[in-house]
Amino acid sequence: MKKTKSAFIGVVILFAVWVMLTDTSSSELLFGGFTALLVVFLFHKKLSVLEDVKISPKSLIYMFMYLFVFMWELLKSNIDVALRVISPKLPINPGIVKVKTTLKSPLGRACLANSITLTPGTLTVEMKDEFFYIHWIDVTSDNIEGATKSIVSNFEKYLEVIFG
Amino acid sequence: MELAGSIITLIGSIVLFLGALGIVRMPDVYNRMQAGTKATTLGTILFLVGISLGHSECGCFGKIILLIIFVLVTNPVSSNALARAAHSAGIKLTDRSVKDDLKNDKEMGEEK
């Protein structure tokens, strides 16, 4: 069952890429679909990363919401960093803090680390077990719990539903 | 439509410029990376969106979306790898830094 699901997601992703790259005439769609099936059939053993993705109406809605939250955070982070850069005093207060994640799946953690890197003033430096070490441009809390709450929690509640 | 595309492209290039300024002004490797990663990601995205709006006759919208997804996935990964390599190579944080949990944990691991 798990194999089928990861194969299905693989086919959907490959086919979506094909549709975006080419024009939509029926013979090209047919050929693209066939190629996607063939590639997934040949490499289905390597696709176990995709097993963690859940497919349900709820997780699809959360994926959309996550996309918007993520875009908003990216915009905010750019304004934040830009303001710091152009102000003459350079108001930074940097440091590396340690945060804890509750996500289990490798793909979910990779997603979380990427999101953290693109959000206001944070940059993932190292991952070790369930801890992330994050360079924070403006350290506002000293302990693990406080840092976790202000950096990770915002994304975690979405990724938890999507990846489990 | 072409005007909107041009404006968005202009905003994108301003963001890229601010990122470059940040790389010059920040005091150490990690802070420079902060400015570099975020500004290049949003700047590139705005740039691409502006181009696809301004030249809508080329039908390259799908390709632009693919490019944006690719930038979104690879940009943070590369900066993460660079930051990690810098820290393992022992490059110090700036004097203005407040704390360094990773260094403390590494030292504790060595003592054991």
Image: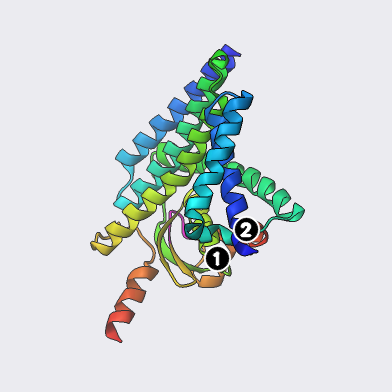
Residue pushed farthest right?
A57
Q: Position of residue A153 (x, y in %)?
A: 61, 61
Q: Nearer the viewer, residue B104 or B72?
A: B72
Q: Is residue B111 above or below residue B88?
A: below
**Mark 2 packing: few (<14 Cα in 10 Å), some, or many (20+)?**
few
Residue pushed farthest bottom?
B112
* Residue pictured at 62% horizontal, 63% vertical: A2
Q: Position of residue B71 (x, y in %)?
A: 45, 39
Question: Viewed as shown, does residue A34 lie left or right of B10?
Answer: right
| Residue A163 lies in quadrant | bottom right
Q: Quadrant of the N terminus of chain A?
A: bottom right
Question: Viewed as shown, does residue B80 lie left or right of A140?
Answer: left
Q: Are marks 1 and 2 on the same chain?
A: yes
Q: Which mark is residue A4?
A: 2
Residue picked out by circle 1: A105
* Residue pictured at 40% horizontal, 57% vertical: A94
Q: Earlier along the polypeptide chain: callout 1 or callout 2? A: 2
Q: How many marks?
A: 2
Question: Viewed as shown, does residue A57 lie left or right of B20?
Answer: right
Q: Nearer the viewer, residue A44 or A103?
A: A44
Q: Secondary structure at mark 1?
A: loop
Q: Is residue A149 above or below residue A19?
A: below
Q: Is residue A16 above or below residue B1?
A: below
* Residue pictured at 52% horizontal, 16% vertical: B6
Which mark is nearer the camera, 1 or 2? 2
Residue A114 appears in the figure = no
